[in-house]
Image (cartoon, rainbow, N blue to C red):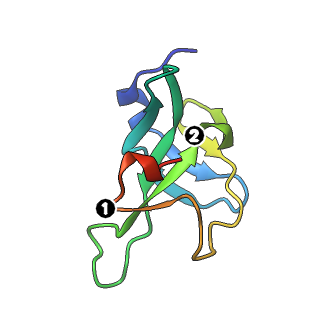
Amino acid sequence: MESSFLELRCKEVVNVVDGRKLGHIVDMVFDLNTARVCGIVVPGEKTFWNVFKSTSQLFIPFECICKIGEDAILVELRGTNTPQNPYILSHNTNNSEKK
């Protein structure tokens, strides 16, 4: 199955562990040395004071993607409610922090 980034952006990302909708893909991370997709990035949770802009982004490794369907992308993320989530990226990250 082939899909473009524009097609993937339109699909809702859903965590199969808790059924939570994570949003739509805002970015993809590639390893340029091996020409492979490392993962996808979705918006983080929005705060009460800043409803229109998320405070962080959620990086989802490619290994956590279970299925890419016609309408949704199913991912398996465990422990995303913990504040020390290794997949949470702040706005001031650089590429070395996106493991």
User: Crowdedness of circle 2 by 10 Å Cα count: few (<14), some, many (20+)?
Assistant: many
Q: Which comes before the other along the chain, label 2 or label 1?
A: 2
| Label 2 residue SS | strand
Q: Is residue 63 left or right of residue 91?
A: right
Q: Give the image quarter of residue 56.
A: bottom left
Q: Quadrant of residue 18?
A: bottom right
Across and down, in percent, residue 86 comes to: 58, 62
The N terminus: image quadrant:
top right
List the residue tagged with mark 2: 73
The one of 70 and 61 positioned closer to us in this rendering:
61
Residue at figure coordinates x 63%, y 75% from the top left: 82
Q: SS of the residue at dot 1? A: loop
Alpha carbon distance from label 2 to label 1:
27 Å
Q: Position of residue 55 (x, y in %)?
A: 35, 70
Does residue 75 lie above or below 4 as drawn?
below
* Relative height, residue 12 to residue 17 (above, below): above
| Label 1 Cα crowd, 10 Å radius (few <14 / some 14-19 / many 20+) | few
Horizontal placement of 34 versus 15: left or right? left
Q: Residue at x 27, y 78 (%)?
A: 50
Q: Amino acid at mark 1?
A: Asn
In the picture as drawn, the residue positioned furthest to the top comes out as 1
Lateral position of residue 96 relative to residue 36, left or right? left
Identified at 52% across, 20% down, the residue is 34
Foreground pick, 50 / 32: 32
Inspect the image, locate mark 2, and give the three-letter code of the amino acid beneath it. Answer: Ile
Determine which residue is flagged by label 1. Answer: 92
